[in-house]
Image: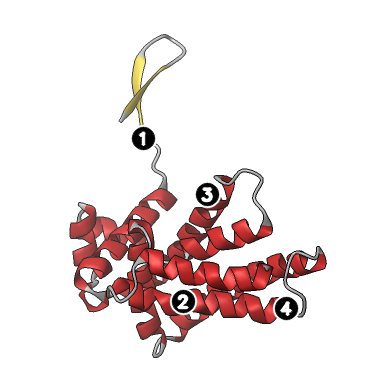
Amino acid sequence: MATSVDRQGSVVSVPKQVDHEQRRRALAEAVFSVIGTRGFEAVSLRDVAEQAGVSMGAVQHYFASKSEMLLFALAHMRARVLDRLQIAISRLTEPTRRERIRAVLRVMLPVDEPGRQEACVNIAFFSAATITPAYADLLRQGYARILAVSQAELRAAADAGETTEGIDPDREAAALYFLTQGLVGPILIGLFTPEDALALVDHHLDRIFG
């Protein structure tokens, strides 16, 4: 309980304001932690409650079922990635279009701890999406949004004469994006180092931008 002073100067107790959306996001983060350490099948309301350090009833207050909780977690993952993309670009000083595109692609790779966790969670949801249409819908929306941004950037670069002559912006954006997705697994299992993967991305960016 918080305290306040009424008009007569007396100290009174007032209910503490609860940020329900923040609580839901915290539980989604707990879902990610469970998936990252124990796998998708280990996720349950009880496991998430334990990971988050709250009661089972607290989780059920926000999510009526495991399915509802996982759908929210997947939507939160998309928002979390977009936030990291914006932060990465904001840290660049007067970036070129090539630098902005590289920053986006780097965030999509598991080259740091947030990226590794997101990659593990994404792979888990992809497996589940083959039999759960609701997961597939959210994943398609996320892919389509990021791909559209990449294509718009490359079209603008081509219009400005920044790309190699004859480059098809839409196809090259798709090739770059799905190259990045294809590198996720090899990085996670140690076949490629993050540096190896980024060098391959740079190689393709050099070919596009000349």
Instruction: Name the amino acid type tagged 2.
Output: Gln
Identify the disc placed on residue 16: 1
The residue under the point 42% across, 45% down is: 19
Which mark sits nearer the N-terminus, 1 or 2? 1
Q: Residue at x 80, y 65 (%)?
A: 161
Q: Which residue is mark 2?
A: 181
Of mark 3 and mark 2, the one earlier in the sequence is 3
Q: Which of 125/199 is in front?
A: 199
Residue 116 in which image quadrant: bottom left
In percent of width and height, residue 111 lies at 38, 62
Specify the amino acid type for callout 4: Ile
Q: In percent of the image, x 41 and y 89: which residue is there?
A: 130
Q: Which residue is mark 3?
A: 87
Marks 1 and 2, how far apart at CA? 44 Å
Q: Which mark is residue 167?
A: 4
Q: Which residue is situated farthest in the bottom direction here?
A: 131
Query: Could you tell whether 128 is left or right of 76 in the image?
Result: left
